Image (tube, grey):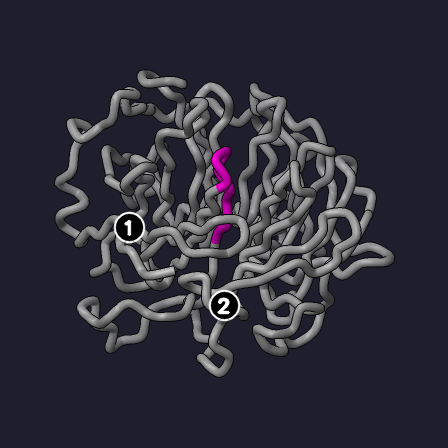
Amino acid sequence: MGRTAAGICTLTACLLLTVSAAAEVPVPRFVVDASWPMPLPNNWILGQVASVFVDREDHVWLLHRPRSLTPDERGATLDPPISICCVPAPPVIELDRAGKVMRAWGGPGPGYDWPAQEHGLRVDAKGFVWIGGNGTNDGMVLKFSLDGNFVMQIGRSAPRTDDADTSQLAKPADIWVDEAANEVYIADGYGNHRVIVFDATSGAFKRLWGAYGMPPTEGIPVIEPTKPSGYDPNAPASADFGNPVHCVKIAHDGLVYVCDRINDRIQVFRKDGSFVSEFTYLKNTRGAGSTWDVALWPDPAQTYFLNADGTNNQIRIVRRVDGAIVGSFGRSGRQAGQFHWVHSIAIDSKGNVYAGEVDNGKRVQKFRVVSGAP
C-alpha cells in the first residue's frame, strides 16, 4: 500500500484549469435556481445546513441546526416575542423535487442521545435515516425510520476515548451505507482520525483504518478544525488524518472517497481499507482546509465527482479517473449562486446539485444542470 499522489494542485494552478481538460463525457455546467426551495411552512426558518442528501426518489433531505439560530432569527419564539418571524424548523426535513416540505422531525427523545450539534445525514435504500453530530460529547450515530421512529444507536454521548475504541465514536462527520454488504461507513471525525465500519443492522464493529490505510496513530492531538498560524504548505504530507475526517462516499465501482479536510486532500480506498490514491487541492489554503465534501456524478461510470470547498467557497468538478479539475462554480458572497461556508453537497439523478451552508450562511441552494447532464 504505497503512497500515490494522483493529483496535486496549488491555490493558483487549480483555478487555471478549464473545461478543455474534460474526458469524453461532457463536463456539466450549472446555473443557480433561486426559486428553489419553496417557502417553508409554519413560520419556520433554517439554521446552519450541516448535511444535504438526495434519495432514490430525488427527494432532498436536509439536516440543519436549529440551535444555531440567533435570538433575532428566532424572534417569534422568545418570551415575549420580539418579532413576527421566525420559528426554528425541525432538524430533519424532506423536500420533494419542487422543494416542498414532505416530512419534518427530529430532536431529543426517549431511548437515544440526540446530538448536541447535528452533522451528517444519509438515507439508505431500505428507508432508514442515519444521523451524526459533532458536538462536544457526540460519540454516536443514530438510525431512524423515514418518519423519525428510533431504530438503533451506535456509540454513546460521552467524552472521546481513543481511536482504538470500537464501541465509541468521536464527533462523527459523515455516514455512507453499502447496501450490498449491509455495512455503514462513518467518517469519524472531528475527534478521531479514522474511517470505521459497522454492520448496518446489528451495529457490530467490522473494521477501521486511518490515512493511507494504516492504523490511526493514537496520541496525535485533536485540534480545532482550522490550520495553525504557523501552517507551512510546503511541509511533507501528514501520515495521519487530521481533524476532521469530514466525508465518506462510495462509488459504484467500490472505491471509497474520504475527505481529509484540514490536509486539503481526498484519499481513495478499497472497501477493505487498502489505500489506492490521493488528490490534494489548493494546498496554500489556510483556515479550515479545502476538501469539505464529495458528491459523485450520476452517469453510469460516475465520470466526475464534485468537491465542496467551504474555505474558498467554490464547488470543483473533478475527473474521477485522475483527480484533474475540469471546472468549478461559486465564490464567496451572499447573493444567489455564491457561498458562505458551503459545507455539504448532493446530486440528483438528473445532475442538479444541492448545497448546504453553515456558519452564518444558513441556507440550501439548488444549481440546475444546463449542459452535460447524465
- Quickly name the residue at label 1: 312
Measured from the top left, where is residue 201 in percent x and y? 77, 47
Amino acid type, label 2: His
Q: Is residue 258 above or below residue 168?
A: above
Q: Nearer the viewer, residue 267 or 292?
A: 267
> Which residue is rendered at x = 80% and y = 58% of the image?
112
The N terminus sits in image quarter: bottom left
Measured from the top left, where is residue 35 in percent x and y? 46, 22
Categorize mark 1 by other alpha carbons within 10 Å: few (<14), some (14-19), many (20+): many
Q: In the structure shown, which secondary structural element does the residue marked by tag 1 occupy?
A: loop
- Residue 331's quadrant in the figure? top left
Is residue 90 visible from the viewing direction of this image? no
Residues in magenta, as a range: 247-254
Amino acid type, label 1: Asn
| Residue 125 located left or right of residue 21 | right
Q: CA distance from mark 2 to mark 1?
A: 24 Å
Return the mark for residue 75. none
Categorize mark 2 by other alpha carbons within 10 Å: few (<14), some (14-19), many (20+): many
| Residue 321 located left or right of residue 232 | right
> Which residue is rendered at x = 13% and y = 47% of the image?
13
